Amino acid sequence: MILQRKSFLVLALPALAVLVIVSIYPFVACVNNSFRFYDLTRPSEGKPWVGLTNYGLLLGDVRFWHSIKVTLYFVAFGVGAQLLLGFAMASLLNSLERVSKVILPVFLVPMVIIPVVVGLNWRLMYDQTLGIINYLLNALGFPSQPWLGSGFHAMLSVILTDTWEWSPLVFLILYSGMKALPTEPYEAAKIDGATGFQILTNVTLPLLKPVILIAILIRTIDAFKWFDTIYIMTSGGPGMATETASMYSYLIAFNFFNIGKGSAFSVLMLALVNVFCVFYARIIPREGGLG
Amino acid sequence: MKRRLVGFGVVLLVCVFGMSGFAFAQKPYEGVTVTVITWDTATARAIEKMLPEFEEKTGMKIDWNVFSEPVLREKVMADLAARTGVYDIFLLDSWQTARYARAGYVIPLDELLATKRSEYFCEDFAPVYLDALKYDGKLWGLPYYGVVGILMYRKDLFEERGISVPETVDQLTEAAAKLTDKSKQMYGIAMRAIKGEDNPIISTSWTWVFGGEWLDENMKPGVTSPEFIAGVKWFEDLLRNYGPPDVSRYSWLEVQNIFVTGHAGIIFDASDFVGRIEDPELSQIVGKIGYALAPAGPCCPITERYPSHLFTAGMAINADSKNVDGAWLFLQWMTSKEVQQRSVGMGNTGITSVSVLQSEEFRSAYPTAVPVILRAMELANPEYMPHIPEYPELCEIIGTQISRVVAGEATPEEAMKVAYDEMYKVLEQAGYYK
C-alpha cells in the first residue's frame, strides 16, 4: 500500500541516490576491478580483463592465509573479550540507579577518541623500556613485559587495546537492551527464590538474545575490517604476528597500488564476513524469549 | 573651448602614463595559483613562513598542503592516477621516483633546466641526492630533503670506559658489548628492525658492506648469497645481544627515543636526527653526543662501500599540471640556496645544497656533526638499493623478513629463502625474466 504512493518514491530518492553513489557504485566497481589487471603504477597497460587471476594469486599466497588466520584470532578473542567486558559494564550500571547518569559518559570515552590517537598513545605506553605500563608493573614488583616486542604479546596487546576501545559500544547496546526489558519476569523469579546466577542465565540472557546478536554482529563486522590502531601500534609486526587481512590488503592496494588484487582481496573478505553473519543468525534465534 | 581641450589632453596623458605604470607594476604570475603538497615537517613549516615573500614578488598564489607520509602517498596517487592535476608540485621521494616516472606521472626536468633556469636555481645540489631522483637517464625532481647514515654515540660513556670509535663492524660489536647492562636497562646499540619497508634502508646498508646485494647481475634476488646472510646474521646477533629487548618493533622514532632518554649507547640512523637529539626540549643527553662515520664491513674499506642509509625526498612537477611554468619557478625557489640557508635556523637538517651544508650557520649549529655528515655524503653510494620501479615491493619483502629474523621468528637462512621466493615472484610478474 505505502509503496504504491508516488510520494514514497520522491521522499526516498535522495537517500537512494546517496546509497547508489556511496555504496552500490563503488561496490560494483570493486567487483569489476577484481577481475582486471589494474595497477596504478602501470597506467599504460590499462585495465584488461584477467578473469580469476587475482583471486588465484591471493588464494595461492601463504601470506594471504596467514593474514586471515591472524584476523580470525583477533576477531574471536577481541569480540569475545568485548562481549564479556561490555556485559559486565552494562550489568554494573544497570544496578547503580542514581550514579548511572554520571558514569555513563565516562564509560563511553574510549570509543569516541580518534583511533589514530588511541594507537599512538597505546604504542607509547606499551614501550618495553620507556612505557608507563611496564613502569607501573615494576613498581608493583612484576617484571617488564615485551608488550609489542614478541609475537604472542603483540597479539595480546592489540586485542587489549581494541577491547579497551570498543567494549563501550557493546556496553551501550546491551545497556539499552537491559533498560528495555520487562520487569515481570524478574519479579516472578524473585518470588520463586531464584539466585542471582539463576536469574542471569534463565531470565536476563534469554531476554537479551536479540540485543546480544546485534552487538556481536556489529563488532564482528568492524573487527574484520579493523586497521588504524594495529597499523599505528605494530605495522603488522613483530615479524608478521599482527598482520591482519586489512593490513595486508592495505599494503597491496595503497602501498603497491595494485588495485585489481586489492579489490579481489576485499571481495574475499566480504565473502568471509558473510559466512560469519549467516552462521551467527542461524545459531542465535532472532526472537528473544523465555524457553 | 581651448581650455577644455587642454584639460582633456592633460587627463589623457595622465591616463596613458598612469596605465603604463600600472602595466609595469603587474606581476609576472598574477592570477596563477600553484598547489603544493609535502610532508608535515619542520622544513615545511619553515618554508611556509617564507611563502608571502615569494607571493609578493611574483604575484603567484601558493596553495600549501602538508600531510603525513602515508596520507600524502594516497592523496598524490589518487590525483596522479585520475590525471586531475590537482597538485602541481608534490613530494617525490627516491623510492617512488622510478615507478612514478615510468608511469608518466611526472615531468622530466632536463629541458626546463636547460631552457628556463631562473636566478633561484640551486647550482650545487649534492650529487648523491640528485642521482637518487634520476631514472632512465632523466631527472624527475629537485632534492628538497636528504639524509645519509651516520653513527651517533654517547661520547661521555665512550670516554668513561675507554672505548674508541669503532672502525670495523667487529669493533662496533665490541663497543656495544661494553656499553650493555641489561639489568640497568642500558643497551649498547639500537637500530631500526620494524617489519616492513622502514628497516632495509638501515639493515641492507650493513648487508651491503658484508658484500651482499639485493639483486645479482641477472636481476635475480641476491638475498640468499652467503655474504648477504652473513650480514643479516651480524645484524640479528648485534641487536639480539646488545639491543633493547623489543627492538624488532623499532622504527626511527623508537631508536631516537631510546637514545635521547639515555638508554642506548650507540645508534645508526639518519643524519637529520641531529636537529632533534641536540634539542634540549626533547633530549636528555645534549652535550654528551659524539658523531662518527659508520664502520666498514668485512668486504671492503668505507671508501669502497659505506653503510650509506641514503634517502632523498624531491619535489616534482605533476605531468597534468596546468601551471608548469609557475610550478617550475616555485620549485626552484623552494629548493634554492637562500631558502635552505634561512631554514637552517628553523630546524631543517636535511639540507641538500653543499654550500649551505658547509656554511658558517649550519656548521656552528652542529659543529661536531657537520664534518661527519659531509664526509658521509661523499662516501654514500645509492647503488646498495636497486633503483627500479619494483623497489617498494622488494623493500617491503626484505624488511619484513629481516624483521622476522630479529624477532626470532625465523633463522636468517629460512627468512632469506622466503624473501628470495617472494622477490622472484614480483620480478617475474614484472617481466624481468623473459
Image (spheres, coloured by chain):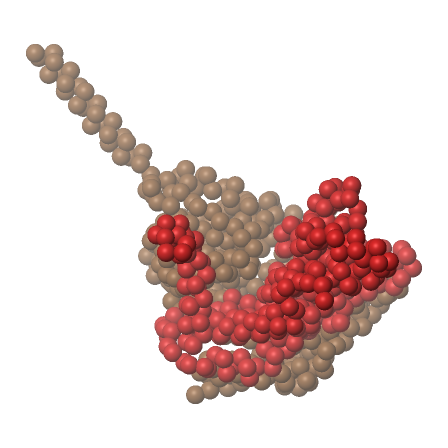
Chain colours: A red, B brown
At horizontal 45% and vertical 81% (from top left) the residue drawn is: A52
Q: Position of residue A56 (x, y in %)?
A: 50, 83
In this rendering, is residue A99 above or below B100? above
**B309 or B413: nearer the viewer:** B413
Query: The C terminus of chain B lies in which quarter of the figure?
Result: bottom left
At horizontal 69% and vertical 70% (from top left) the residue drawn is: A76
Left or right, B92 with reference to B112: right
**B206 or A67: nearer the viewer:** A67
Q: Which quadrant of the structure image shows residue B250? A: bottom right
Give the farthest residue toward the left.
B1
Residue B352 visible, this angle: no
Q: Which quadrant of the structure image shows residue A149? A: bottom right
Residue B124 visible, this angle: yes
**B203 or A226: nearer the viewer:** A226
Give the farthest residue toward the bottom.
B434
Give the farthest residue toward the right.
A141
In this rendering, is residue B351 above or below B375? above
How many discs mark residues in the rendered view? 0
Left or right, A205 with reference to B50: right
Q: Position of residue B274 (x, y in %)?
A: 67, 54
**B218 or A164: nearer the viewer:** A164
At horizontal 50% and vertical 80% (from top left) the residue drawn is: A55
Left or right, B157 with reference to A23: right
Q: Position of residue B22 (x, y in %)?
A: 28, 31
Query: The N terminus of chain B lies in which quarter of the figure?
Result: top left
At horizontal 68% and vertical 51% (from top left) the residue drawn is: A180
Q: Position of residue B209 (x, y in %)?
A: 65, 76
Left or right, B45 with reference to A163: left
